[in-house]
Amino acid sequence: MLVFGFWTTKICNTRNCFNKIVLIALFSLTFHCNGFASIVCPDLKKILTKFDSPSRWFMLGKKCKVPAGARERLKEAIAISEAMSEHAQKQAARYDLLLPEDAGFLEGDEDEDTNTISQADIADAVDITSGSKYFNLHLSQFGPYRLDYSRTGRNLLVGGKKGHVACIDWQTKDLKCEMNVMETVNDVKWLHTEAMFAVAQKRWLYIYDSKGVELHCVKKFNDVLRMQFLPYHFLLATASATGFLQYLDVSIGKEVAAICTKMGRLDVMAQNPHNAVIHLGHPNGTVSLWSPNQKESLVKMLCHRGAVRSLAVDKTGTYMVTSGLDRKLKVYDIRAFKPLHSCFLPAGASCLSLSQRGLLSAATGEIVQVYQNVLGSNPVSKPYMAHRLRGQIWGLAYCPFEDVLGIGHGEGFTSMIVPGAGEPNFDALDTNPYRSHKQRQEWEVKALLEKVQPELIGLDPGQLSKVDQASFEQRHKEQIEALGFDPLAKDKFKPRTKKKGRSSAGAIEKRKRKVAHEDQRDEIRQSVQERTEREKELKEKSNEKKLGNKSTLDRFRK
Amino acid sequence: TTADFAVKTHIWTDDWQVHHLIEGSDDERKHKKLLEAIGSMGGRKRKKQNERSEASVQVSEYFVNAEGTGDKVNLSDLLGTVEKTSGASNKTKKQLRNLQSSKETLELPLNKQQTEKVSAEFSVQLLVSCWKNIILQNQKAEQMVFPLNQESSGPKRVEQVVAGWKVQTPLEQEIFRLLHGSRQPVNDPVLTPVEEQSLKAMSLEEAKIRRAELQKARALQSYYEAKAKREKKIKSKKYHKVQNKAKRKDFLKQFDEMVKTNPEGALEELKKMELSRMEERMSLKHQNSGKWAKSKAIMAKYDDSARKAMQEQLQMNKDLTQKMVVPSDDEHESIEEGLETVPDFVNDPETVIDPVNPWMRGQLTHEEPEVSCVTAEEVQTAEEENEEEEIIGEFERKRKLRQVVEEDVVEVSDKEEEDEDEEEDVSEFNTLFRLMRSEKTREGSNQTRGGLNTAGEEDEEGLLSEGQIRVRSIEDLEVLDEVVEPRAIEEPSAPQTAAAEATSEPPHKKKREINLKEVLTKEAKAVRLPFLPTVVDEEERDEQISIIKEAFAGDDVISDFIKDKSRQEAAGRPAVVDLTLPGWGEWGGVGLKPPRWKRKRFRIKTAPPPPRQDQKLPDVIISEKRTASVASHQVSQLPFPFQNTAQFESSIRTPIGSTWNTQTVVKNMTKPKVVTKLGAIIEPMVKEDFIKSKTTALWLLEIGHKKFVFSVLGIVGLHVNSCAFCL
């Protein structure tokens, strides 16, 4: 068995300054068993290169080509902006030097499946600090439990069905507050900092501070079943049993939007971290996407033949994983809304969770299974890790920036070590697990200043950088009417007058014909060229296959 | 008597010509003159030069004579030998031949006034044009720092400090005289004064610039001359009339300005006007007394235009004879003052510093020794830049190397394999879709044929049962496990039959392309579990079954979804506006349908909307509503230089904020357009400011750090750009 955790050099991401570098080894060990040693898990490396190659990572949109007959000013404007964006990309790539950490991994011996390795073995193998990250909280009285980690990954919030709510600094096992709200607790959620959390109780939504003092009872939000917090918008999205999706702006304490979904009880909910769109799963097998700006769903997709049981969206907003009553697990590309692959889990998955590095954990009955390489087109065959618990699993969540999976179940809470789950490099100006009180305060002010307005939530997060086409066209039309000509139109071709009878009507017409539809011609020419090239390639390939890679003349080739 | 007069004059002229002739040859000369006089008596007067007939000590240039003088000299006479010489290149020979064959004569140069005028106009233009570039550059510059030529704040060299120091005491003066007189280096500098001067005089680049300027000037002047000549040649009276009128207007406009700026010139102009007035008063021009005027006077009775022409003439006369307003006395005074205050340097003799160096004669631009120091710094920074690049390159290399090593150690499944897998997946999906389409079309045809064709439906049911499973009840669901695997085996046969069906029955109506049911029943792979779940308790099982029952409460999820989607699509389609009036032009009543022609004419169909986004996604409904919430934050007008939205969008695609950028980039991107130094006096720009920067920029260009210049010296970089364009 080989376990590799990451030496987490806690460096801020690209934008950070040097003074905030904190060097901490999270858990650091290369453990060799039976004299077998290998260096890196191949699959993980693939993921790494896929997500982190600087060329893709730092690319910012498409380059703009300077049109042929452009004005000097336009040329300059484009050149300047291109130079600037290139400079920005280069600088960002240079700062990539400061992200040296690789993610951890787990590798079995020959003929040993990683999913047979028990948590106890792993905890024994790793160092004490890391080993202490595998622990159980036996809370059989008020279970089953829902849970939530704070954005920095330091604090854990657990809420038992029967009213038990506790928040813990899980690394030091320091209990911050514990109470019983004497009501059914449906869901718990941290707000923007670890100083406040929301609890969805039987009737209303309550907000407590970290000491357990009740701050608010929000009576506009009733029968809440699930909650999601959108950190950059300061919005708490709630889904209720009455079919309402509501948004609460926690910075000003106002309800931003209340949408009647007309889809019945809403107990499956996830957020897309990429564009802050809320995904809801419904009993009729559909998943609907919502923004606070539209009273109807943005997208509705039929995913399962039975009810949707659980949902998860990955960090980049590319993939969505769903599980339904038909006991299927499906992976969707939610940019194109197309299913990538599906697999059949005999027990069905009741809870799903995706880690920062794309590990999928699914709760099937009493077993938690962790899958690797689910996101992508190749279907999964066997789990990466598995862990059996006692009692129904009610909540699953990965801890950010740690190789830890938190499981809330009927018998309490279990923290499970999953090597390779957490992102090793974090952005200290955004989410710093090691921030001090002062830093947190500073961050809070800055985050509030940079708060994104709820109007900007939509399927395309880059909408703001686009020109508003509808009003642009309207304005353009008005301008044409006022001026009597189109100011943006291309100049019509005017043939020059020539002498000696070459400017006759026919000749002029001929010359006009020569340049007619020039732009279309360009496109056609290009497409034809591409096609011929493709055909040529295919032909060459087939020829090679036919000839068996070698011809008699090949020996003269260098 | 006429001959006598001719002789006399001739003698006189010759006398003037050969006033220093030697005394001895007097007789001979007289004789020749006589001969000449006789020769010239008949008809044309031909002047013949004296010939030298004997060798003498002093040879007058007037006696050098060539044979056949008076004849035209041909080019061939001068260069005829070139053809024969073997050394001359063929090219030159050819050129010469071409020259000979061309018959064109050179045009006469313009007269003095016109040349002066052209050159004056041109010089003004030159003055303005040299500023044009710098103004444009400053307008375009990303950042301007005022005052413009700030001295570097760092420590200075001793020579620079000493340069500003003046000698005061006589002893010092004496010492300096001694030192500078001998042209010896002071304070042990790198260069002697002579060398420095020569360096200062004019660098190669400056010389090049100067030469280019002169070339340009010459070329432009020749263009102007040619233009003036062309205009002069134009015979059209109307053209000249218009031209003159325009000129007059222009002149009047300028005159007012001239009074203020150049009183001397204005006075001269006034004098000219006075003269023209005199002439006008003297002459009978414009007084309707000429032949033309008389003829017009006859016509004036009947012809309006003639009358008008006459009146115009009179008006002209009036205008020209009007007395000019004499400028007041104080103006005269100011003019006199202006005359007095001619700058002193006019009288200064030209200081020739180094007789050997021809460049020294020109006015020197003050070049500080600072320049070299600055450049040295720049070179250093450039080197640093290079080092940084090298570091990055090294980092990249190392990373690649690491990757390669890792790949060698553990056999990573290649990317190509992955791609192939993807392709296979896609192709599988496509075949499924094709199959579905064919089925759907068949369904559509069935419907068109005759409502609910039960037999057809049964047939379809049979087919469906072959290819897929429908879950309608719990029993079905329970069986699902067993069915999953055999279905996978069966599947390959299904598409063939479907395809055959499709070919046999051509589709009549194009309907939905993809069958939903197929998409949902996509093959799922069963996952092997490490340890199977514990046996489910009976109670839990019952509970689960009840849940499932609830979930499938007697309805088909898929058909519901299809209905929902078709409803959405129908809502998006524009409605047909029916304007038919029942009973108009025909019998009306209950149960009567309006005739076809009426329906055709009065039912207005609007254009169909653009295709829906979810047109090709059977299991997805995408809302077509436009959200107006973002619109208020978006840009709705194209800013100036951009011609289309794509250009503008790509120009703002790079975020400026510190969340996405490094600190330096943020600073660079948000730097202010104008920076002024607190408390510093901002002087107006002088020519030396930009000329110097030009030269330094050029120097940097030559070194080959173009990129460096662009990135580091913001403004100077732009100067380089413009230099490259203008030179």
Image (cartoon, coloured by chain):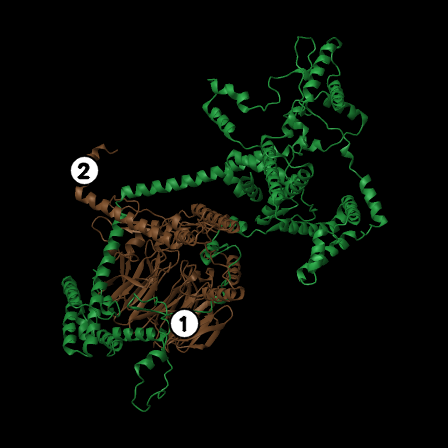
Chain colours: A brown, B green
Query: Residue B225, how many percent across, how many down?
Result: 62, 39
> Which three-letter amino acid code belongs to the residue tagged 2?
Ser
Q: Nearer the viewer, mark 1 or mark 2?
A: 2
Q: Is residue B656 above or below residue B388?
A: below
Label 2 secondary element: loop
Mark 1 Cα-neighbour bin, 10 Å: few <14, some 14–19, many ≥20: many
How many numbered marks does the figure carry?
2
Query: In this rendering, does residue B176 appear at all?
Result: yes
Q: Please state the chain letter of the residue tagged with numbered disc 2 in the rendered image.
A: A
Q: Which residue is mark 2?
A: A551
Q: Quadrant of residue B452?
A: bottom left
Is residue B689 left or right of B516 when viewed as pictured?
A: right
Nearest the eye: B205 or A358: B205
Residue at the outermost front position: B1
Residue at 68% from the left image edge and 52% from the top image edge = B245
Nearest the eye: A109 or B226: B226
Find the distance from the CA under tag 1 to the CA under tag 2: 69 Å
Q: Quadrant of residue A197?
A: bottom left
Q: Which residue is mark 1?
A: A238
